[in-house]
Amino acid sequence: MLRVAKKKKNAKKINKVHQDLLNHYGSDILNSKNFIGTSKNTQHGSMSVLQHSINVAKYSLLINEKLGIHCKTKDLIRGALLHDYFLYDWHDKNHVQLYRLHGFHHPSTALKNASKEYKLSPREKDIIKKHMWPLTIKPPLCREAWVVTTADKYCSLLETLRIHKEKKK
């Protein structure tokens, strides 16, 4: 029983540290009108794009720490937050076209949108552009992009299976 309580306390501590890092490196993104607007669009299951992006950023930090990958924290967080910055509801019939499948094309749209609003580092661009590998054909070039790609796949699976559900406010 004591071990479970200790694990929960440690998990809360880790979550607080990750949230502090997100706020430190990504406050401009987290507080932007367009990013906040992604809360209206569903990503997978019942998860919003906004919460999915935050989850991917937190899991990216966790993967980086647990595996000792030594990613650049700022690039990792900012790229993860902006990886799905496509700014539309891909479930809407107006955006679903047979020749323009969302999974193949949204990384380019996200990069274009993010580039209009933020000065992106080469690593951040690589993260956004390649996070859908292998659909994007060209693999990620930096370790940060590999970590975000992995975290994105993991979060997407949990959301699609409805293991991760968005908490209603």
Image (tube, helix red, strand yellow):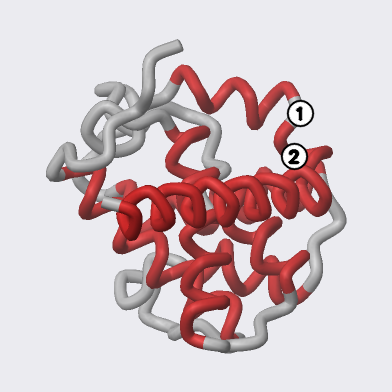
Q: Is the Cβ of the residue at disc 1 closer than 8 Å to that at disc 2?
A: yes
- According to the picture, the residue beneath numbered tag 1 turns out to be 32
Q: Where is residue 166 in the image (x, y as percent from the top left)?
A: 35, 27
Residue 132 position (above or below residue 46): below
Name which residue lies at 43% across and 70% down: 149
Q: What element carries label 2?
A: helix
**Circle 1: residue type:** Ser
Looking at the rendered structure, the kind of residue marked 2 is: Ile
Q: How far apart are marks 1 and 2 (CA)?
A: 5 Å
Position of 138 with respect to 145 (left or right) is left
Q: Is residue 164 above or below residue 39?
A: below
Residue underneath mark 2? 29
Question: SS for tag 1?
Answer: loop
Quadrant in which residue 27 is drawn: top right
Q: Position of residue 131 (x, y in %)?
A: 46, 67
Residue ID at (43%, 41%)? 52
- How many numbered discs sit on the rendered protein? 2
